[in-house]
Image: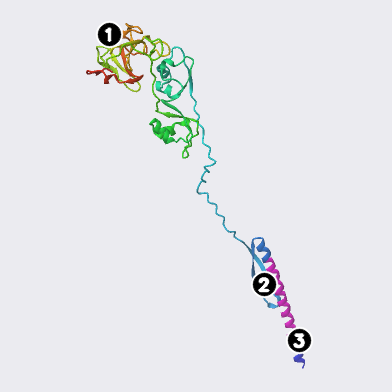
């Protein structure tokens, strides 16, 4: 009987101990779960690993090591530059810095051009408001001097680079490549009313227009005589130092100074004097109007043997060759014009010529 009671007492003790251990395990697990939840909210995972205690040789667990939560990666792709918004791009205005020339009493288009290293045509190209008649270039006028041969073009609304290039017959690349035009690739935006330099373009050349008031008191010009419509050589020589071109509206015939000059066709002398005023390049000049829309010019003369209003006939002596005005040696500069437009004299004159340039 004593043995049964001792056995029951020992068994009851074991049950109490076992119940205590189970209670302790339950408390530890609850505490560990709370820590895990709290650590998860802070971005840390708490790992629970078992450890062994010496309480009655029964294994218990404890909370140990913590591991960081690895956040998901955020991808930033900066491998491509952002495309500019075309609605916010601002085109640049041209930034030209032109020189200004004030015309003096002794200036001519050629002398001005020579001073700045450009062609006389470029004076017209940079100053569309001036007349192509060189004798109307007024003293005191202010001229824009372009840095290169070409034209200063004012952009019209809706105009394109291709249209401008086609207008002047120049490559688009030449317009883009002129630095102060400020045309930025790839946009190449044009600003209306801005001005672009068009390198290599031309608006035309200067001419000298002789007065046509001789022999008429007013109204439409009437001529007493009309030419034959055919032309003879105005000098005996055929040695040419300059030919007709867009930059040279006549031919230059090399002749010894003082050689006779003849009227190429019948007509009325409208000008016979030194080419006074703004355009002295011609020097001593005789102009004959042939009454049929044609005129002939005889320039650089050393002597004049005609007067305004005089009727001359084909082959009449009107002066002598010289080296006056802007001339590099004795010769005759000869022009044929039809309604003020230059014609190639060699298309009207007969006989062989040779080059002496």
Asked if 324 appears above or below 177 in the picture, the reply is above
Most extreme residue toward the bottom is 1
Indicate which disc, 2 or 1, sits on the residue closer to the N terminus.
Answer: 2
Q: Earlier in the sequence, mark 3 or mark 2?
A: 3
The quadrant of the picture occupied by the N terminus is bottom right
The answer for how far apart the CA atoms under marks 3 and 2 are is 29 Å
Task: Give the secondary structure at mark 3.
Answer: helix
Judged by its main secondary structure, the magenta piece is helix
The x, y position of residue 178, in whole percent, is 44, 31
Q: Mark 3 points at which residue?
A: 9
Asked if the residue under mark 1 is in contact with the one under mark 3, i.e. CB atoms within 8 Å, the reply is: no
Q: Mark 2 points at which residue?
A: 61
- Magenta stretch, residue numbers: 8-35
State the residue at coordinates (77%, 92%).
Answer: 2
Image quarter for residue 300? top left
Residue, disc 1:
316
162 or 181, which lies in front? 162
Residue 169, image quadrant: top left
Residue 85 location (% of width, % of height): 53, 43
Of helix, strand and loop, which one carries label 2?
A: strand
Within 10 Å of disc 3 (Cα), the crowding (few <14, some 14-19, many 20+) is few
- Real-space Cα separation, disc 3 to disc 1, in angstroms: 166 Å
Tag 1, which secondary structure?
loop
The image position of residue 164, as x and y in percent, is 42, 33
Residue 108 in view = no
| Residue 108 is a magenta residue | no
Crowding near the residue tagged with mark 2, few <14, some 14–19, many ≥20 C-alpha atoms within 10 Å: some
CA gap, disc 2 to disc 1?
Answer: 138 Å
């Amino acid at each position: 009987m004593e043995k049964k009671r001792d056995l029951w007492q020992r068994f009851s003790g074991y049950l109490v101990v076992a119940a205590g251990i189970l209670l302790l395990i339950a408390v530890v697990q609850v505490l560990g779960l709370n820590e895990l939840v709290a650590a998860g909210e802070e971005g840390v995972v708490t790992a629970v690993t078992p450890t062994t205690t010496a309480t009655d040789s029964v294994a218990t667990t404890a909370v140990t090591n913590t591991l960081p939560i690895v956040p998901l990666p955020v991808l930033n792709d900066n491998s491509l530059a952002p495309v500019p918004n075309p609605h916010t791009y601002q085109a640049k205005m041209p930034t030209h810095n032109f020189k200004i020339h004030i015309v003096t009493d002794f200036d001519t288009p050629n002398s001005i051009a020579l001073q700045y290293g450009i062609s006389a045509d470029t004076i017209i190209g940079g100053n569309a408001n001036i007349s192509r008649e060189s004798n109307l270039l007024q003293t005191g006028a202010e001229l824009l001097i372009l840095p290169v041969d070409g034209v200063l073009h004012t952009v019209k609304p809706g105009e394109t680079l291709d249209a401008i290039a086609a207008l002047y017959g120049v490559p688009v690349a030449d317009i883009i490549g002129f630095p102060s035009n400020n045309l930025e690739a790839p946009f190449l935006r044009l600003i209306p009313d801005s001005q672009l330099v068009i390198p290599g373009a031309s608006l035309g050349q200067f001419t000298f227009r002789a007065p046509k008031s001789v022999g008429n008191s007013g109204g439409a010009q009437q001529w007493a005589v009309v030419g034959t419509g055919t032309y003879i050589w105005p000098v005996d020589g055929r040695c040419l130092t300059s030919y007709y071109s867009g930059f040279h509206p006549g031919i230059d015939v090399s002749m010894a100074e003082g050689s006779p000059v003849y009227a190429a066709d019948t007509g009325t002398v409208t000008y016979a004097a030194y080419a006074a005023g703004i355009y002295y390049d011609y020097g001593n000049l005789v102009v004959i109007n042939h009454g049929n829309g044609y005129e002939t010019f005889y320039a650089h003369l050393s002597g004049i043997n005609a007067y305004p209003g005089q009727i001359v006939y084909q082959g009449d002596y009107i002066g002598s060759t010289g080296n006056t005005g802007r001339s590099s040696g004795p010769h005759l500069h000869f022009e044929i014009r039809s309604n003020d437009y230059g014609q190639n004299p060699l298309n009207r004159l007969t006989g062989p010529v040779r080059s002496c340039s």
